[in-house]
Image (tube, rainbow, N blue to C red):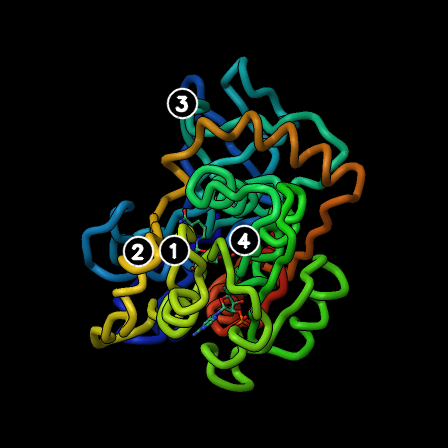
Amino acid sequence: STQIQLTTRPAGSPTPENFSTVSVELPDLGPDQVRVRNEFVSVDPYMRGRMNDTRSYVPPFGLDETMTGGAVGRVVESTAESLPVGTAVLHGLGWRDLAQGPAAQFSALPDTELPLSVFLGAAGMTGLTAYAGLTRIAALKKGDVVFISGAAGAVGSIAGQVARKLGASRVIGSAGSADKVTLLKEKYGYDDAFNYKDAPVRQQLRAVSPEGIDVYFDNVGGDHLEAALDRLTTGGRAALCGAISQYNNTERTPGPDNMANLVTRSLKLEGFIVGQHQDLQPEFAEKMTGWLTDGSVVFDETVVDGIDHAVEAFLTMMAGGNTGKMLVRI
Ligand code: NDP
């Protein structure tokens, strides 16, 4: 099995030198185990946090150990009755071409018309993140004006469309290129969008939200969160999903300069981790499968070929080179 390991902890932005590719001989299967040929492995922003040796909601990656992460593939060898050869599965042994272990670590995927890769993105972890953040954390209601940062990424591209489904009256997005802004408006149904690199976010958000915003879905943190706090209306809610603008920081950044708005406008900011909202999975799966199948929710994937290019895929995603879900096809 070809596997990717972390060899040194990055300071600031990771570089290819922080990783190595190793070849691992897999033992014969024990009882109730499966071997899976991964078809797609996921690269995600939260993995940057796992490259640091700091306490978080998931333990850090070990040095000289194969990294883990979301993956989908098919069983190619099995001693488990529950998962016969050919079964399509979702599991956590990414960053490798062949995965192996107890059957209990692998979940059979539902039988749908959808391609397997979708269960890592729109119909998987990132889609559920968008859904949980909007429904449960931000408690989006009909008529709300919604602002989503990181809007052209895996979570953001789905969040914009789900916000519309939930009855948002206006959906505004930000992303890091003119092409992404066009896509937001023409493909993902955003009413308005801006490129955060064009001018200060505060200034651009104000221009596109004359009536203020009721909900902010934060994927970016920093200047985006600060700008949103200025625009949230009384009783506004922010779902704090991520802060990718800060993941490579080596120094502490100053906090938002306008936290007093929380008091004067009774704002509610709440962070969340999708793993704590797995109880929404059945409801989400039913709705999203329907929306994806009837085409009323669309999605993009940016695919890099070959396990040897997984690190490159991760670094490209962190730098904004992806639209929709970033994946490695094995
Ligand atoms: P994306 O597909 O959105 O990829 C990351 C994107 O971040 C890039 O494409 C880039 O787009 C953008 N980006 C990178 N640097 C910056 C920056 N300095 N300022 C603004 N944007 C930047 O990733 P995901 O959809 O998987 O994740 C989006 C966010 O959601 C992340 O913060 C992630 O940590 C979080 N997340 C949280 C979960 C939870 O349970 N709370 C679960 C899953 C994700 P651009 O070209 O627009 O700059």
Q: Amino acid at mark 3?
A: Gly
Q: Secondary structure at mark 2?
A: helix
**Mark found first going from the N terminus, 3 or 2:** 3
The secondary element bearing badge 1 is classed as helix
**Residue type of the residue flagged with mark 1:** Tyr
Above or below residue 176? Residue 240 is above
Residue 256 is situated, as x and y percent measured from the top left of the image, at: 29, 70
Question: Hey, what amino acid is under mark 2?
Answer: Arg
Q: Quadrant of residue 53?
A: bottom left
Q: Earlier in the sequence, mark 4 or mark 1?
A: 1
Q: Residue 184 location, x and y as percent? A: 68, 65
Whether residue 291 appears in this view of the structure is yes
Marks 2 and 1 close (CB-CB < 8 Å): yes
Label 3, label 2: how far apart the Cα atoms are: 30 Å
How far apart, in angstroms, are the residues tagged by discs 4 and 1? 12 Å
| Residue depicted at 53% across the width and 60% down the height | 148
Residue at 36% x, 45% y is: 272
Q: Look at mark 1 in the image and give the residue it sits on.
A: 46
Is ligand 1 closer than 8 angstroms to the Cβ of mark 4? yes
- Residue lying at 27% horizontally and 57% vertically, measured from the top left: 263
Q: Which residue is mark 4?
A: 155
Q: Secondary structure at mark 3?
A: loop
Q: Earlier in the sequence, mark 4 or mark 3?
A: 3
Give the residue furthest to the right.
294
Q: Position of residue 15 (x, y in %)?
A: 38, 75
**In the image, is the residue at mark 1 within 8 Å of ligand 1 by its beta carbon?**
yes
Which tag is nearer the camera, tag 2 or tag 4?
A: 4
Residue 127, quarter of the rendered image: top right
